[in-house]
Image (tube, grey):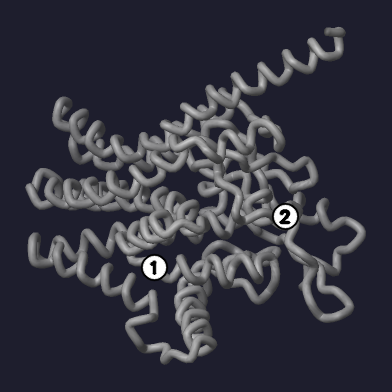
Amino acid sequence: MNTGQLTFGSEAARRRTLLTLKKYSYLIAMVPLVLPPLLLAAGQATDLVNLFSWGVPVVVFGLIPVLDVILGKDALNPDEDTDVPRMIGERFYRVITLAWVVAFAVLLVWSMTVLASGIFSVAGAIGWVVSIGIVGGLGINVAHELIHKDGRLETWAGGLLLSLVCYAGFKVEHIRGHHVHVSTPEDASSARYNQSLYQFLPQAYVRNFLNAWKLEAERLRRKGHRPLSWRNELIWWYSLSALVAAGFTLGYGWLGLVFFLGQSFIAFTLLEIVNYIEHYGLHRRKLDNGRYERTTPEHSWNSNYFLTNVFLFQLQRHSDHHAYAKRRYQVLRHHDIAPQLPAGYATMVLLALVPPLWKKVMNPRVEAYYRGEEHQLAS
């Protein structure tokens, strides 16, 4: 064997070792599910339960950005011929996403029981709802992975998880709306250049909800069915949300309903903030025939910070996801041509909450990306 073959073999072995280490790092994505019980135990042990009820946002938006900087970036891509087929076939990657759905359903009921016990002050109770809502927002990311798959078990599990945060329309609108119109004015989930988060959110809530019903109605009409029928999947998923809300209300009174709706609002708001980050200011060019260019990795912001990537099942490799929507999270790739965010999503969410700071950081990056064709910024 010559030296070149030895070098190649060593490199392949190194890559495979790193991919194996990364495989088990995805267990970090399960941490949000155990954070509330751990924080509650810490609060009870220190008699600071109302302070620790706010622990999830502190960990997600305080600790993780710091660890992102310390742990750095990960631009490792699996080999398409040797690694990808093997990784797609490994059951581990599917099991942890499906387990997430079951664990979140249990966490939701347990969290409500804790709230109903009366251990929190008003401020502590608000912190608890916000904390569980953030976990639910991370759950929408898990649902996002599941609804993109062809298997019925995964797509139904994704729909169930979305129903637990009252955002079932995402299952329809994201696949049939967002992925079709991403980075165009027709997409309510793609933020335009110089648009603030607070301008973006109201349109995202309303347009995405209405567009989901429109898309499902169009699908049913094409098949010769009435939109308002048992075949409308949105009716099933939103009915499930209503059933869960009724269950919480019957079991815990008005507090149960407030908890369920409150954590849902936090969850889907976090989702829409992430949507704002993922496509801010990026545009697909309009062709001479009036259609938009094909979606490529250049139409989504990318981030390679290792910790947030495994924490979010590689959602930050959003550029590859939009270019190749069916790829499973474990084989998503980094693309050098994709525009790069200056930090991980946790940090970027904090920036987005302060529009002047967001524009100061992001507008120069958008302008640099479209240098020479500034007319794109007005589209």
Pointer 1 residue:
168
Label for residue 363?
2
How crowded is the residue under tag 2: few (<14 C-alpha within 10 Å), some, or many (20+)?
some
Name the residue at 15% across, 26% down.
Answer: 45
Q: How far across and down, in percent of the image, does residue 204 sit?
A: 51, 70
Up-down: is 216 above or below 248? Answer: below
Label for residue 117?
none
Q: How far across and down, in percent of the image, does residue 90 sit?
A: 50, 35
Q: How far across and down, in percent of the image, does residue 370 sit?
A: 84, 57
Q: How far is the residue under mark 1 from the one under mark 2? A: 33 Å
Foreground of the two, 202 or 260: 260
Tell which circle, 1 or 2, labels the residue nearer the N-terminal end. Answer: 1
Task: Report the quarter where the C terminus lies.
Answer: bottom right
Q: For the residue labelled by badge 1, is the local secondary structure a helix, a strand or a loop?
A: loop
Name the residue at 59% across, 44% down.
Answer: 316
Residue type, numbered disc 1: Ala
Residue type, numbered disc 2: Asn
Q: Does any portion of residue 270 appear in the rendered image?
A: no
Q: Is residue 130 left or right of residue 331?
A: left
